[in-house]
Image: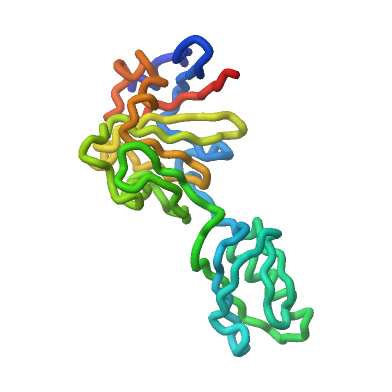
Amino acid sequence: MFLAGCASGLVGEGLGGPSVTRVDMSELPGPQGQTGADQNFEYKVGPFDKLIVDVMGIQDLADRRVTVDGSGNISLPIAGVVQVSGLSLGEAADRITQQLRAGYVRNPQVAVNLEQSVSNFVTVDGEVAEPGNYPILPGMTLMRAVAAARGATEFARLREVVIHREVNGRQMIALYDLAAVRRGAYADPVLYPNDIVVVGDSPGRRLFQQIVSVSPLFVSPLVAVLDKKN
């Protein structure tokens, strides 16, 4: 309610430090500016991801485990070297299908599944039991990321959960009240690869300074653009 009715405000952290410009949004947009029902991402294969390739009727390609190399390739019998980096799992299956056909396999039925994601991850830091990088798949949310990090510690301030994200080339941050999210007061935000989640870390909250004291996080997160000065 407060965010919808007020103009953006500029709040500096301090001399030489980053400045924060509040924006009137009820959610943190996705990396390409997605909002609302468009808040989701499609998994893209990256270097060192582990895949499971299964081709019906070909023994050497039944439930075959492969690791994407540093150049984004996998190597398979008949299909040879297949470039899969940057493709969705469905697109990777289509490319393998094309190369099998080129190898004179008639009507190959190909499935590609993810065994382990290495290239797509979210960082969870602050007052959680096990800070670190965690694989991220479609459907990962803030609450699920905190759960993956074995939950918030007993000292965590659940009203001080910050998500850092690059949105259309701009660094944006959003301050969440995790307790309010758990109560269903507003949506559990979708996460994207390379997001940084900081739980209960007062320096993160200080980025927002005075505006956080007058913005009710129990109805929506507080979203801002972060300008990191040199």
- Residue in front for this viewpoint, 127 or 142: 127
Residue 159 placed where, x, y %? Answer: 28, 30
Q: How many marks?
A: 0
Residue 197 lies in quadrant: top left
State the residue at coordinates (62%, 87%).
60
Q: Residue at x 71, y 64 (%)?
A: 83
Q: Is residue 3 above or below residue 131?
A: above
Residue 113 spot, x, y in % from top left:
53, 70
Residue 158 appears left or right of 196: left
Q: Position of residue 16 (x, y in %)?
A: 53, 13
Image-based side of 70 in relation to 176, left or right? right
Coordinates of residue 218 in the picture (x, y in percent): 27, 29
Q: Quadrant of the N terminus?
A: top left
Q: Is residue 122 left or right of residue 49?
A: left
Report the front residue among 175 and 204.
204
Quadrant where the C terminus sits is: top right
- Identified at 39% across, 32% down, the residue is 162
Residue displayed at 37% across by 16% down: 209
Instruction: State whether residue 166 is above or below residue 213.
Output: below
Q: Is residue 201 above or below residue 8?
A: below
| Rendering colour mode | rainbow
Farthest residue to the top: give it: 15
The one nearer the camera, 89 or 27, is 89
Name which quarter of the figure residue 109 lies in: bottom right
